[in-house]
Image: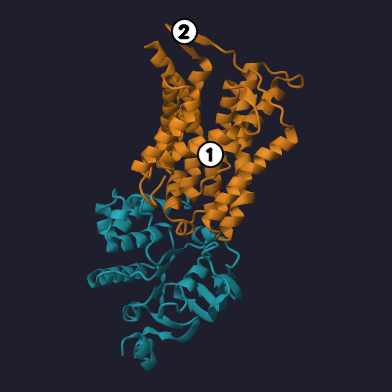
């Protein structure tokens, strides 16, 4: 097991956001967390990436293990640097005042000096050719879809082996959504482990191997994607009947 | 003609001091969105540090020549002053940042920190003014009716070099890129594997180090030190930075020199008691026409 979340309980201030959830991700898998707004999906990702306060939720019980070892005391920059775990956050959060290329470059901040970065930039540009065309532009000027691709590309440039994605389809036109999800599948086939948080449960379950359904800080259903897609309650609540 | 050139030189010298201090304000603002009101007092602390370092080096225990003392005082003052800046960040601003305190409280903390520096100086050293030792033999050059000193040249050249250096750091280096990125979105910085606190420390090192340098040059130019010497010049430098477009390196530089020119310009025409009134009125007008400052971009895309 690559990532193991055990009975995790977290609070924002006095508000408990997760009530003891457990899930795991195996190497090479795509796992999805689905659920409505406020179910605790983003909170789970922020807790795993150990974001610093004030954004971070406070862990009050449970544990997060990466390759069997607790990462609750790991520094957020080390999550990226040592564990090779990267998050493409909700709302993309690209650095709009930097160029496309600088956005990719800044993600290599903590990497080994001798890494062959040129080849990796090329790989990102192969994956998302639009970024290559626009690499000298201020990234603010990109369209929503391009910004999302940049956010994913930026996360990949950290040299991650495990990619966490928070609502990557949000605000994208259907064509772009499918394109992005095809790219994610391609990445996974090349060996990337992916934890995907999505409101679009249908899309997510068609990409993922397994999934967990979150509801107000609890996991209410879990299983392979086929099982969840066939589960009448999940169907009713999250897949539009 | 000589009169005009002389005044331009004077304006450049004053502008250099404002610019050097304004650069520190703008750096910290660019990264933390905080007007570090203690920065003028860091300048004062820098002047005092340089006083003690220089006096010690030329004093009986070490006995260096003034020139030798100067060469060592410059880096030592910068290092020690940046330590003061970093300490301030560590004990005053970082805890508030950790708790997610509203910006207002951080600004008030900065104001108080400045007062603490002023009054702890007063308490420790008393109100008597200190006389800065002469480190560099003053050379005065005459070109027709224009007088120029080696110190003035040094001040102006230093301000230009510091500006070019900081511009290079911010636009061309990895740390500078991280600084620009923080100014846009602090949230995503740790996700890039960047330890946010170390970038902030670098920012304070740069800002305070050059404030220390400004303090040393100021003390050499106007060799009388007192605990409140950083107050008015600090305020003026903030205003210069804001008029230039706070958060922008070029803006701080241009704003500093603009203020120098306005002040000297006013004094050549009006009695010197009108200087600050006119200078600030002109700056008010500039802000009235362009609230984001000369080089400022509205909203979040600073530095």
Task: Identify the chain of the residue marked 2, using the numbered disc in the image.
Answer: B
| Image coordinates for residue A15, horizontal then vertical, percent | 55, 76
First in sequence: mark 1 vs mark 2: 2
Question: Residue at image x 63%, y 40%?
Answer: B84
| Image coordinates for residue A80, horizontal then vertical, percent | 49, 60
Instruction: Say which colour chain B has.
Output: orange
Spatial CA distance of label 1 from label 2 is 35 Å
Q: Which chain is cyan?
A: A
Q: In which quarter of the image is residue B52?
A: top right
Q: Residue under circle 1?
A: B207
Give the vertical position of B288 relative to A196 (above or below). Answer: above
| Image coordinates for residue B135, horizontal then vertical, percent | 62, 18
Question: Residue at image x 55%, y 30%?
Answer: B214
Q: In this view, does B33 lie to the left or right of A225?
A: right
- Residue nearest the observer in this picture, A104 or A126: A104
Task: Identify the chain of the residue marked 1, using the numbered disc in the image.
Answer: B
Give the vertical position of A179 relative to A143 (above or below). Answer: below
């Amino acid at each position: 097991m690559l990532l193991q979340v055990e009975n995790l309980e977290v609070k924002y201030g006095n508000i408990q956001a997760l009530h003891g959830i457990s899930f795991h991700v195996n190497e090479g898998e795509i796992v999805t967390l689905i659920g409505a707004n406020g179910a605790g999906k983003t909170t789970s990702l922020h807790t795993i990436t150990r974001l610093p306060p004030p954004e971070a939720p406070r862990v009050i019980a449970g544990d997060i293990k990466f390759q069997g070892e607790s990462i609750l005391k790991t520094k957020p920059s080390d999550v990226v640097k040592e564990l090779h775990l990267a998050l493409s956050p909700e709302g993309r959060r690209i650095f709009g005042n930097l160029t496309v290329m600088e956005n990719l470059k800044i993600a290599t901040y903590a990497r080994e000096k001798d890494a062959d970065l040129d080849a990796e930039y090329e790989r990102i540009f192969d994956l998302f050719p639009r970024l290559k065309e626009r690499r000298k532009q201020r990234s603010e000027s990109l369209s929503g879809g391009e910004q999302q691709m940049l956010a994913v590309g930026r996360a990949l440039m950290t040299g991650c082996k495990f990619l966490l994605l928070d609502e990557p389809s949000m605000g994208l036109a259907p064509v772009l959504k499918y394109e992005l999800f095809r790219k994610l599948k391609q990445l996974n086939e090349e060996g990337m482990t992916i934890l995907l948080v999505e409101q679009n449960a249908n899309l997510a379950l068609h990409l993922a191997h397994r999934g967990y359904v979150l509801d107000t800080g609890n996991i209410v259903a879990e299983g392979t994607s086929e099982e969840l897609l066939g589960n009448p309650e999940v169907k009713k609540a999250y897949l539009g009947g | 003609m000589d009169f005009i050139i002389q005044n331009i030189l004077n304006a450049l010298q004053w502008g250099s001091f404002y610019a050097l201090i304004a650069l520190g304000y703008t750096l910290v603002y660019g990264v933390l969105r905080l007007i570090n009101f203690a920065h003028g007092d860091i300048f004062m602390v820098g002047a005092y540090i340089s006083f003690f370092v220089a006096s010690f080096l030329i004093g009986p225990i070490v006995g260096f020549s003034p020139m030798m003392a100067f060469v060592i005082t410059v880096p030592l003052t910068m290092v020690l002053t940046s330590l003061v800046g970093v300490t301030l960040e560590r004990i005053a601003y970082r805890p508030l940042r950790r708790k997610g305190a509203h910006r207002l409280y951080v600004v008030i903390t900065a104001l108080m920190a400045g007062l603490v520096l002023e009054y702890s100086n007063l308490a420790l050293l008393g109100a008597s003014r200190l006389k800065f030792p002469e480190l560099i033999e003053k050379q005065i050059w005459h070109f027709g009716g224009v007088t120029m000193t080696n110190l003035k040249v040094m001040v102006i050249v230093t301000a230009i070099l510091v500006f070019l250096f900081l511009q290079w750091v911010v636009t061309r280096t990895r740390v500078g890129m991280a600084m620009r990125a923080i100014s846009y979105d602090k949230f995503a910085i740790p996700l890039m594997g960047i330890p946010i606190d170390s970038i902030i420390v670098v920012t304070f090192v740069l800002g305070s180090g050059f404030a220390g340098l400004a303090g040393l040059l100021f003390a050499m130019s106007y060799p009388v030190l007192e605990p409140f010497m950083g107050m008015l010049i600090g305020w003026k430098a903030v205003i210069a930075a804001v008029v230039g477009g706070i958060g922008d390196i070029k803006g701080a530089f241009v704003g500093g020199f603009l203020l120098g020119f306005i002040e000297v310009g006013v004094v050549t025409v009006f009695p010197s008691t009108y200087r600050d009134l006119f200078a600030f009125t002109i700056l008010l007008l500039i802000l009235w026409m362009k609230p984001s400052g000369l080089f400022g971009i509205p909203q979040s895309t600073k530095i």
